Every structure is written in C-alpha cells, then in structure tokens.
Amino acid sequence: MRKTVALFAATAFATLISGGALAQTLVYCSEGSPEGFDPGPFTAGTTFDATRPVYDRLVHFEPGTTSVVPGLGLAESWDVSDDGLTYTFHIKPGVKFHTTGYFTPTRDLNADDVIFSFTRQSDQSSPWYQYSPGISWEYYNAMSMPDLIASIERVDDLTVAFHLTRPEAPFIANMGMDFASIVSKEYADQLQAAGNMVQFNQMPIGTGPFEFVAYQQDATIRYARFDDYWGTPAGVENLIFSITVDASVRAQKLIAGECDIMPYPNPADIAMLAANPNIVLEQQEGLNVGFLAYNTQQAPFDNPQVRTALNMAINKPAILEAVYQGFGQAAINPIPPTMWSYNTNIQDWEYNPTAARAMLEAAGVTNLTMNVWAMPVSRPYNPNARRMAELIQADFAAVGVTVNIVSYEWGEYLARSQEVTRDGAVLLGWNGDNGDPDNFLAVLLGCDAVGGANRAQWCNAEFDALVQQAKTVADQDERAALYMQAQEIFHAEAPWAPIAHSVAVMPVRSNVQGYVMNPFAIHEFATVTVQ
Amino acid sequence: MFRFLLSRLALIVPTFFGITVIAFLFPRLLKGDPVLLLSGERGVSPERYAMLNEQFGFDRPLIVQYFDYVWHLLGGDFGTSIATKSPVLHDFFALFPATVELSLFAVTFAVIIGIPAGIIAAVKRGSLFDQGAMGIALAGYSMPIFWWGLLLIVIFSTTLGWTPIDGRIGLRYFFDSVTGFMTIDALISGQRGAFSSAVSHLILPTIVLGTIPLAVIARQTRSAMLEVLSEDYIRTARAKGLPPRRVIGVHALRNALIPVVTTIGLQTGLLLAGAILTEHIFSWPGIGKWMLDSLSQRDYPAVQGGLILIALVVMVVNIIVDVLYGLINPAIRYRS
C-alpha cells in the first residue's frame, strides 16, 4: 500500500514540477530533519517547521507578530464566558482536509476533529494516546493542559466549548501553538481500522496551505499547494525542504541558487552573504531572553543589593559584540521588547564597576568566590555560553569577585540547575511559546516554578500575586498594567541579570517575495512567491 | 573451505552477544538522561519524570532491561526511537543504503587509484613519483575532512559550478525508492538526466570520503610490494627472464595483496559504520548522521540498535575478507 502511495505521490509531484524550471517551487534549506509529522508529540522547532505547511490551528497569530487575531485560524470567532471558565469556538464552515493518494476525506472539518485533536493527548484510554510506542505529549503537558481543561463539549457540528478548571487568559494564545494543530479524526479512524496507526506520524493529513507529498529521510520533504485551501492559496505550487545540516554548506547553496531561503546562518558567513547582491538579509527581534540567574535562596545572593551590584558589573555591550556578533540587544526586563506589556519606563542597571564594588562592600561582601554555570550547547538566546561566562568572569573580577566557570552535559545541566540548593549563578534563557507575557513571567519566575524552570529559585509574593491575577483577567490592557508592575518588582529585586535578546537573521534570495519572519522562530511559507 | 567458513560463522554468535552487552551499556554509561533532554529548558516535574521513565521502561533494573531488550532482539524487534517514535529498524534501513552506496564508491575510488599508485611508487622507489605520491598520501591522511569537503565545495560547486553542492540527486528528480541506491533507482525511474544527476552528486563526497582510505591503501600497497619485491623468488623470476610486467603483476602483486585486502576490508567496515563528517558536510542521508543525532539525544533504542546493526554489517564484511584471504592464500584456510 505504502509503495503504491509513494509511487502515486512521486508521479504526481514529477508531473507538477515537470516542464524544466522549478519556477513555481520554493526551496528551503532546513537545518535538520523533523522528528515526525504529527506536531502533538514533539517540541522541536525543526519539526514544527515541517508540520506548519500541513496543519492549521483554531487561532493563528498575525504574521510577524505575537497577536492573535480572530478569523485568521480555523475558528471564525470565539466567546469567553463571564467567569472566564468556558471558551466557545465557532469553526469556519466548508474547511476541507487534504485529498491525497493515501486519504480521501468524505466530509469537511467539524467539531469532532477539534475534540479528537485534544483528547488524543489527554485521554489515556484512547488508543491514540499511545499510538506509537514511547509517544508522549510533552507540549500539551508542559502548558499544563491536563490540569486546565476540565472537558471539551461538542455544542454542534461547528461549535466546540472548552471548559476550564480555572480562568486562564493565555488560553487563546495557547490554542495558536503547534501542539494545538487540528488533525483529521476521519483519517485517524481509517488508519486505526487498517491497523496502521503509525502512518499518522509519517504521512500527515491536515487543512493547511500545502499538502504533504513525500519525505525522503534526512534528505528532502516535498509539499504541493493545496488548491482547496480555505484561506489565501499558497504563493508557490511546490515547497521543498532540502535538509542541509551544516550552516556553511547552507550558505554556499543559497549563493549558488540551490535554495531560496536558509535559516540560522553561521555568524562568520553573514558578512559574505550580506555582500552578495542576490541575497537579502531579513531580520527579526527574537522572542527570547538570555539571562544569568542567581540562586536567591543562597547567601550572599539572597540579598537584592548584592544581585544589583553584580548586575552593575556586567558589561553588556561587550557581550553583545563578542557573543551575539552584533545580532542582539541588551535585555533590561525579563520579557523581550517586542512583547505587549513590556515596561519601557525601566532603565537598565548602569554599568559601573566602581559603584558595584562599593555596593558589594556596603553589603559586607568581600573576597566572594562563586560559580557561574555555562551551558554546554548553543541556543538562539545564548549562542556561546562559555564565552559569555568568560566575559562575566572578567567583569566580576574587576569588582573583586572570583568566578569559577562550571558546566555539565546538557541534560544534567538542566536538571542540576533546577535544584534549590544549587550554588552560584546559572546562564540560561528562554524562547517564547505563545507570545503571552505569562509564558515568561509565570514560567520562569513564578513561585510554582521554584525547583523547576525558576532557576533563580525566587519567590516574591507580591510579584507572584500580580502574575497570577493577570491570568484571570480577560482585558489585555488591564493585564498589561499588572505585568508592568511585576517588571518593576523584578527590577528592584534583580533575581537575574537579564543579558540579551537575540536578533534572528534569515538570508533570502532576492527573487523571493513575501517572506515574513515569525517571532516564534517558526518558518512559514504560505505567503511566499518566487519571481 | 566449508569448514573454514563454518568456523568463522561460529564466531558470530558469541561476538553478537558481546556486542549486545556493549551496545546496551555504552549509551547508558554516557552522562545524560533522555527524559531530561526531552523536556528541555522548561524542566520536568518529579511526577512526570517518573511517569515518562516508567513509560520508556527505564525505571526497571538494568539487568531486566537488558534481557528484555535481547529477548525482543531475538524476535527481530530493535525497539522504537525515542526521538522519531519510529521503529529503529525502519530508520536504519531507510538510511543504510545511502551509506553503502557512498562507501562502495569511496572504496572503489580508493582502490582504483591507491593500488596502482602504491605499485608504481614501490617499483620506482625513491623516484619523484614515489616521493610525490607518498607526500600526497600523507597529506590526504592528515587532511581535516571538514576543511577538505568545504574547500572542494567552494572550488568545484560554488566557484566553477561543475558539481552539485550536496544531497543525492537534483531536486527536480523525484521517484519512488526501489533499492535505496540512488544510482540504480535513477536508472529504474527512466527519468532523463536522473542517473547522471545521481552520479554527479556522488563525485565530491566520494573524493572526500575516499581520500583517507586511498592514502592508507597506497601506502600499504607500496610497503607490501617493497617487501615482496626484495624476496628471493622475485629475484629468481627476474633472473629467469620473465617480463617485468609479469613479475610485478602476477608474482609480486598476488602476495603483496594479502595485507592490502585486509586493509581494504577494514576501511570498508569503517566506512559502512557511517562517515559522520562527510555525511554532515554533503547532507548525505546516511547512518553516520543518524547515529550522531541519536547519541546527542541519548536515544537509547536508536543508539543500541544502530550499534548492533553496524556491528553485524562489519562482521559480515570481515567474514567476506577472511574468505577472500583464504582464496588468495590457500595456506591460511588449510591452517584454520
């Protein structure tokens, strides 16, 4: 069966791209292979890049922003009950699922598909909960969905109500995330009946702007435009992901015209790419933050004065130059400036080693020796933690603090840095999931996260109350006011030294039009055309 | 010959079980926890950690996990990858033909150039050719693969435009995989230009991957030939007036080939184990890159399954080498 399907797809695609030039084809040199094609069980951006062409969600973010706008996704609109406990989504009528060589839908999208898309991630009695050995729903769990969703109700064919256990203002933004992609229940039923459920993760069916054609493992992924797409049709007929793991090779392919867009260029290659007249460097401020988290439960870092003094000793411009190669901006608050509710009134700690040393002495801290943890991996929010740690080591030495740099294997680093009794200060960071401030402030600095993602082990009752209150308020302006207050408390208490927000660079060939960078670092191509 | 083969095959069983122990323990001896890596910066609560550990079966005593694994192995079940959620066997065999194809081209390239170069260097010992060839062989042996690959790409692909940069075939060609070998599948597809595209995509990776084996084979052939050429029977053959081509090509080369065949076998085994750097540079979808990714994610089922399958392949190659050994030198099979 699979052979026949693959042959059909091959023939169809060959027909599509025959005629010589690949003019209606967009080639994206992706940086890695997707883990699979079901967005539910995975967490990697590379996987979401590969599933985004195929699937839609109930709500979509406005391209290039973190704002959710009604009507952009599969839900035409939604209502929130007065108590904030029920979210009712009204699904667009006439939305088609892909018709491919391996699946022919007999009906349009309806409430059953929406309900199935979520219950398969929570209902342990469903055969789809473990449809492949070892499958787990990490994002669904990480976003606390099992605790949050009390039930999902089928109101009618095109209306679904989510009943929550507590008011949760970021819920709408969560529905725009990839784990909330809407899959076809009819396709799932067909595979279950055929005893071939694993295919759900290998040959996807969705309602998105492109339909899946084929995946040659670790080599290429091919998609074709879905002509019955409910929204604006994709700008190109064919979309090919050419998997190219080496960043320098990706750059060479872009120069040679073997691909049209490439992500994550090597910083050393950026000047060469910028000098090429056929290449345009698109830039987007990342929805991320890189920080140094003190352990606020351990002396002397339990003293805000000590933390503030250390923050004043860090030379951020030097770090931005050496670590981010100029593609970053100094972080002042724990959320990035592109996020709504960012408090522009807060000024960064002044870089003043003399004053910092005096503050430390005033706090009774002399001859301090501390550990600074350097991540063993490169991340967009911190491309070179070792180098950053060395620069901080030199900065702290200038104020009389001796730094020992420590590091561990990545899994161990993540686990040990969570411990409440951990020593020193940890370099880490965060990429935003859904554009909601709660996704930074509660996840990284909330009292519930102490011993977990709150690496500062900082629990401030006033800050926590504001963040928790903001979750229950529906009005965005009101929420923003609460988050701005919370950022003032953060600044006064200085549980972290926020270091930088990185800027993502995307080299694109000049004949490519309409590419919009996504602040969540997901790469989408529905709006792109090739001249 | 049959007994010789049987004795070699009999060794496979204990070797296989030894390998399962090593393959099972190796990823677990490395620091790192697949469950923690799965959860990333966000961290994982102790309850969820315990649940995932139970789900993956990592909460059981190691010895129980091992025997359970071997039991499944004997049934042909290599487990499911933690990362891709696909059966390990599926992932391995989807990628292995690409590695085999590239390895065969690289070894052929190394043999075709390496053996003649080694013979000429030995015959013309001390000549400019000898010094030049051995100098190049040393350089080839010492060359950082990464730098070598990028250099060839910049010169031949980006600057001159003679060869494609990476991949196995041009993006315009798309057909169903029948054998997994792109050159053969391209021929079967009947698409015009597909075969030449597949071959052109093999040129640079073949050169890069074949460089070190070429250097090793050339040096080995030279030293083996030098040793043989100084033997009494060669002097006798020459004294009897046999033509030099026959003395070198038949009398000397046949004996000199024994260590060279061993070297070729070892090199082939190494290449089949995955050419991580070459696959990385040329985006070649083989098992080297897959193993590296699995290792960095501490994907225990994929790493242990991959190690066992690679070991099996290397064992088979070694048996073939042993058989060839016996064919070249009958004394070996009689002794065994």
Image (cartoon, coloured by chain):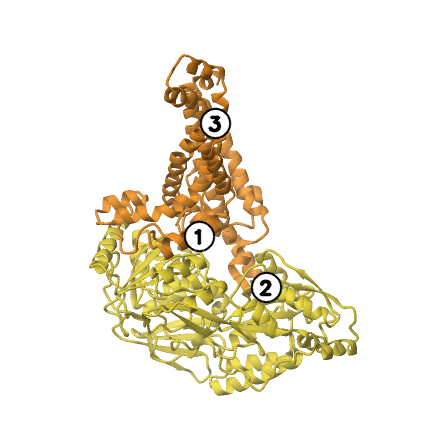
Which mark is in front, 3 or 2?
A: 3
Tell me, for residue A463, which label it has, or none.
Answer: none
Residue type, mark 3 in image:
Pro
**Residue A428 in the image: x percent, y percent?**
58, 66
Identify the chain of the residue marked 2, using the numbered disc in the image.
A
Residue A362 located left or right of residue B318: right
The single residue placed furthest to the front in the displayed view is B128
Between B140 and B97, the one nearer to me in the picture:
B140
Tell which circle, 1 or 3, labels the residue nearer the N-terminal end.
1
Name the residue that disc number 1 marks: B151
**Residue A120 in the image: x percent, y percent?**
40, 62
Residue B115 located left or right of residue A459: left
Which mark is in front, 1 or 3?
A: 1
Do the residues under discs 2 and 1 have CB atoms within 8 angstroms? no
Residue type, mark 2 in image:
Ala
For the residue labelled by badge 1, is the local secondary structure a helix, a strand or a loop? Answer: helix
**Residue A288 in the image: x percent, y percent?**
52, 72
Residue type, mark 1 in image:
Leu
Residue B80 visible in the snapshot: no
How many residues crowd mark 2 within 10 Å: few (<14), some (14–19), many (20+)?
A: many
Between A371 and A479, the one nearer to me in the picture:
A371
Between A69 and B5, the one nearer to me in the picture:
B5
- Chain A colour in the picture: yellow
* Picture quarter with the C terminus of chain A: bottom left
Distance Cα–Cα, label 1 vs label 3: 33 Å
Chain shown orange: that is B
Name the residue that disc number 3 marks: B259
The quadrant where residue A122 appears? bottom left
Q: Residue at x 59, y 61 (%)?
A: A375
Q: Residue at x 22, y 59 (%)?
A: A20
Identify the chain of the residue marked 3, using the numbered disc in the image.
B
Name the residue that disc number 2 marks: A385
